[in-house]
Image: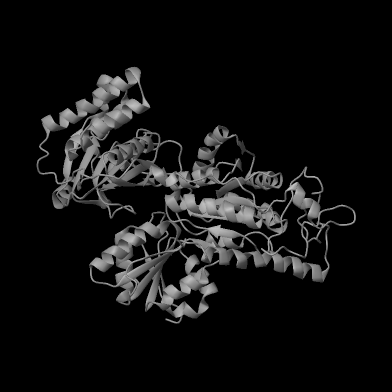
C-alpha cells in the first residue's frame, strides 16, 4: 500500500451527518495543501439506509474517484428500519461496515463504532478477510466516547479524531474548521471528543505498521471546494440571472437550493411552485418580461417542461433550463447516477427542435458553460439547456478561488432599445414586426419587452407571421422554420471560433487508439488514459460537452486520427454513441461502446479494463460493465 493518496470513506445511515462530516474533513485536507475529490452515495430515503461519502486526497491534482479506497470509518446506521437479522432488507445497523468491505484495498484501515456494531454482528468470515487482505481494524466505542462528553451525534467527531491519529494528520486544521462552524459549549464538547478519540487510538493501539497516511502537499493560492451544482449556480448569477423557478427533485434540487439562497443577495427572485410545468412557464414568462431566467428539474420533471420548452423555441424566447440526470425510467433509482437522458433532452418537445445543449465535465466547465449558455440564449433568443448528472452535481473538488474572478455580464444583446424600435419594421396597425422576414446582418431578430414604446407584438405557440399573428401559409412556414433552424448553424460557427474549445483532447497527439466520452466521465477517462499510456498503450481521449449543435468537424477529425474509438458512457443503450453516429454515420465501424448502468460512476480501472478487453477482441469485462461491438461486427 503506497502512501501517495488517502481515500477515506465514512459510512453510516442517512441522517447520521455523513455528508456534513465528509465536507468538513475534505476542507481540512484541502487546507492542509492537498487536492481533493469527493464522491457521494446515498439511498432515496430521508432517514436510514446505508450511505457513504468518499474523499480522495493527494499532493497531485485528482480528477476522479479512485479504484476502491484505503480507509473506512463505519459508524453504523442509527436509523435502521428493522434491526432484526432476517428483516427483508437485512440487518441495516451493520451495513455501513459489511457493504463496504469489497472495495477496501489490501492493507487498508477499518475503524468501526463498537458502540453500535457488536462483535456478534460481524460477518462470520470477517476475521478471515481481515487476515487475507492485511486490513488494520480499530474497534472503538465512538458512541460511548461522545456520550461521556456531549451527545451521541458527536461520534462523527470522534471518528475524525481517530482517523487523524491513525493517518498522522495534525488536528490544527480540523480545530480551525470547528471554530468556524460552531461556538460555545458545543464547540468545547466537540474539541474534547476530537482529542479524546485521537489520544485513545495512540494509547491503546499500535499504528506503526499502518501504511495509510495523509500525504504532504502544497497548493498555489487560496482554494475553494465546489461541486458541479455550485459551478452552475455561480455561472448563472455571474451572467446576470435574476429569476429562478422550480420544484424540488433529486438531484437538481442542489442548484435550486443554492440559487434560491443567493438570489436575495443580488436582488433576484426565487419561486418554488406547484409543479415543473409551472416552473418552466414562469421562467419563460420572466424572460419575456426582460429578466434573465432559469429553471430546471431531473428527468421526470423535465418531461413536464416539454411544452413550455417548445413554446420558447417557437416564440424565440431566451431561457436556460437545467436537466439533472438520474437512473430511470420512471422513478428508477432517484439518488443514483446515469447518463441516459441525452436523447430525452435533445428531442423532447414538438416538431423540429431548436435548442442549444451543453453537458459540462467538471465544476469548472459547469461554471463556464452555464455562462456560455446564457450568453448564447440571450444573443440568439433561443433556449439553452445544461445537461449533467448526479455524479457531477454532488461531487466536490478544489479550484483556485481566483478562478471565479470574472466580470459579470448582465447584457441582453438581442433586445431592442426604444430608439431601435422606432427604426424597426412595423405593421400598418403599429404592431412590431418581431418575426420579420428581413433579419439583420448578424442573422438575429431582436425582441422587445413589455412596456417598451412601439414594441407591441403577439407571442403565440402557433406558427405566426412577422407580427406574431397565427399563420398557416406554406411560404411563411418555410421562411420561419428555416430562420429558426438557421440559428444553429450560426451558433456552431461561433462555438468553432472560440479561443478555447469546450471539447477537450487529452493524451499524445499521434495515439493509435481513442476514447470518446461526454459530460461527467471526463476526469475518470483522463486518469484512465494516463494509466494506459504509462503501461505502453498509445491512447488519447476526447470529452465532448457540446451536444447541440454537434461539433461534427472536431469529432470527425479525432476519429479519423486513430484506428478505432471506445465510447464510454453511463447508460445501457449507448445514447451518445448513437448521437455521434447520427451526425457522423460514416464512422460507425470504428466506434465501440463501454457501458455502465448500475447506478455507480466509472472508476479508472474499469475503463482501463474495458479498453484492454476491447483490444483483445472480447466483450466480457471483469467489472459490472459491458463492451458493445462496432457497427458491422
| Res 348 quadrant in image | bottom right
Q: Is residue 178 left or right of residue 472?
A: left
**x then y, percent, for residue 245:** 61, 41
The spot of residue 237 in percent (x, y) is: 54, 42
In the drawing, does residue 279 fall left or right of residue 395?
Answer: right
In x, y percent, where is residue 602?
Answer: 36, 58
**Quadrant of the image for the C terminus?**
bottom left
> Can you tell which quarter of the image residue 565 is in?
bottom left
Is 277 above or below relative to 517?
Answer: above
Farthest residue in the top direction? 185
Give the image's coloring scheme: one colour
Above or below, 616 against 315 in this view is below
Q: Give 113 or 510, whichever is nearer the viewer.
A: 510
List the single residue furthest toward the right: 428
Does residue 31 appear in the picture of this structure?
yes
359 up-or-down from 550: above or below: above
Q: Residue at x 56, y 46 (%)?
A: 409
**Is 55 in front, or is 283?**
283
Instruction: Report x, y in % for residue 620.
Output: 33, 70
- Count of residue discs: 0
Q: Is residue 54 above or below residue 147?
A: below
Q: Is residue 410 left or right of residue 584?
A: right
Q: Quadrant of residue 77?
A: top left
Would residue 594 be seen by someone viewing this image from the given angle?
Answer: no
Towards the viewer: 476 or 618: 476
Residue at the image position 52 percent from the left and 66 percent from the top:
496
Amino acid at each position: 500500500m503506497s502512501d501517495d493518496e488517502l481515500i477515506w470513506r465514512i459510512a453510516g445511515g442517512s441522517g447520521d451527518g455523513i455528508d456534513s462530516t465528509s465536507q468538513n474533513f475534505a476542507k481540512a485536507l484541502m487546507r492542509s495543501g492537498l487536492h481533493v475529490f469527493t464522491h457521494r452515495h446515498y439511498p432515496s430515503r430521508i432517514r436510514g439506509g446505508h450511505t457513504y461519502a468518499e474523499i480522495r486526497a493527494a499532493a497531485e491534482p485528482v480528477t476522479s474517484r479512485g479504484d476502491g479506497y484505503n480507509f473506512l470509518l463505519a459508524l453504523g446506521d442509527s436509523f435502521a428500519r428493522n434491526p432484526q437479522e432476517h428483516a427483508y432488507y437485512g440487518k441495516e445497523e451493520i451495513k455501513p461496515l459489511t457493504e463496504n468491505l469489497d472495495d477496501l484495498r489490501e492493507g487498508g484501515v477499518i475503524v468501526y463504532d463498537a458502540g453500535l456494531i457488536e462483535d456478534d454482528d460481524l460477518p462470520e468470515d470477517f476475521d478471515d478477510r481481515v487476515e487475507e487482505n492485511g486490513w488494520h481494524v480499530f474497534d472503538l466505542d465512538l458512541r460511548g466516547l461522545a456520550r461521556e462528553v456531549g451527545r451521541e451525534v458527536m461520534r462523527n467527531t470522534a471518528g475524525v479524531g481517530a482517523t487523524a491519529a491513525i493517518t498522522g494528520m495534525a488536528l490544527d486544521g480540523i480545530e480551525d474548521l470547528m471554530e468556524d462552524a460552531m461556538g460555545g459549549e458545543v464547540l468545547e464538547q466537540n474539541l474534547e471528543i476530537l482529542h479524546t478519540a485521537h489520544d485513545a487510538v495512540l494509547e491503546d493501539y499500535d499504528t506503526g505498521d499502518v501504511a495509510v497516511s495523509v500525504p504532504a502537499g502544497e497548493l498555489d493560492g487560496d482554494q475553494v471546494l465546489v461541486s458541479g451544482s455550485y459551478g452552475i449556480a455561480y455561472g448563472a448569477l455571474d451572467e446576470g440571472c435574476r429569476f429562478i423557478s422550480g420544484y424540488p427533485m433529486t438531484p437538481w434540487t442542489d442548484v435550486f437550493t443554492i440559487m434560491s439562497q443567493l438570489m436575495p443577495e443580488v436582488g433576484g427572485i426565487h419561486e418554488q411552485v406547484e409543479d415543473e410545468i409551472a416552473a418552466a412557464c414562469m421562467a419563460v414568462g420572466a424572460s419575456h418580461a426582460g429578466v434573465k431566467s432559469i429553471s430546471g428539474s431531473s428527468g421526470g420533471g423535465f418531461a413536464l417542461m416539454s411544452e413550455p420548452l417548445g413554446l420558447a423555441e417557437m416564440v424565440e424566447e431566451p431561457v436556460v433550463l437545467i436537466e439533472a440526470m438520474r437512473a430511470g425510467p420512471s422513478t428508477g433509482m432517484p439518488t443514483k447516477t446515469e447518463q441516459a437522458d441525452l436523447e430525452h433532452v435533445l428531442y423532447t418537445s414538438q416538431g423540429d427542435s431548436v435548442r442549444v445543449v451543453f453537458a459540462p465535465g467538471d465544476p469548472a466547465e459547469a461554471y463556464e458553460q452555464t455562462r456560455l449558455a446564457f450568453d448564447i440564449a440571450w444573443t440568439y433568443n433561443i433556449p439553452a439547456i445544461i445537461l449533467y448528472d448526479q455524479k457531477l452535481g454532488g461531487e466536490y473538488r478544489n479550484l483556485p478561488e481566483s478562478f471565479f474572478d470574472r466580470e459579470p455580464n448582465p447584457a441582453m444583446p438581442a433586445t431592442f432599445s426604444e430608439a431601435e424600435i422606432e427604426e424597426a419594421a412595423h405593421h400598418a396597425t403599429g404592431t412590431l414586426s418581431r418575426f420579420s422576414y428581413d433579419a439583420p446582418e448578424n442573422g438575429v431578430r431582436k425582441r422587445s419587452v413589455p412596456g417598451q414604446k412601439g414594441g407591441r407584438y403577439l407571442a403565440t405557440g402557433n406558427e405566426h407571421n412577422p407580427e406574431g399573428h397565427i399563420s398557416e401559409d406554406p411560404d411563411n412556414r418555410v421562411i420561419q422554420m428555416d430562420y429558426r433552424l438557421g440559428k444553429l448553424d450560426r451558433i456552431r460557427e461561433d462555438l468553432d471560433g472560440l479561443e478555447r474549445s469546450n471539447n477537450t483532447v487529452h493524451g499524445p497527439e499521434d495515439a493509435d487508439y481513442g476514447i470518446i466520452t461526454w459530460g461527467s466521465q471526463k476526469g475518470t477517462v483522463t486518469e484512465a488514459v494516463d494509466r494506459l499510456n504509462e503501461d505502453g498503450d498509445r491512447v488519447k481521449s476526447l470529452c465532448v460537452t457540446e451536444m447541440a449543435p454537434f461539433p461534427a468537424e472536431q469529432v470527425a477529425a479525432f476519429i479519423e486520427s486513430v484506428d478505432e474509438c471506445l465510447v464510454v458512457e453511463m447508460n445501457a443503450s449507448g445514447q451518445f454513441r448513437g448521437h455521434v453516429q447520427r451526425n457522423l454515420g460514416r464512422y460507425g465501424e470504428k466506434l465501440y461502446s463501454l457501458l455502465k448502468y448500475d447506478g455507480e460512476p466509472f472508476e479508472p480501472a474499469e475503463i482501463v479494463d474495458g479498453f484492454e478487453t476491447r483490444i483483445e477482441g472480447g466483450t466480457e469485462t471483469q467489472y459490472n460493465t459491458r463492451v458493445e461491438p462496432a457497427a458491422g461486427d
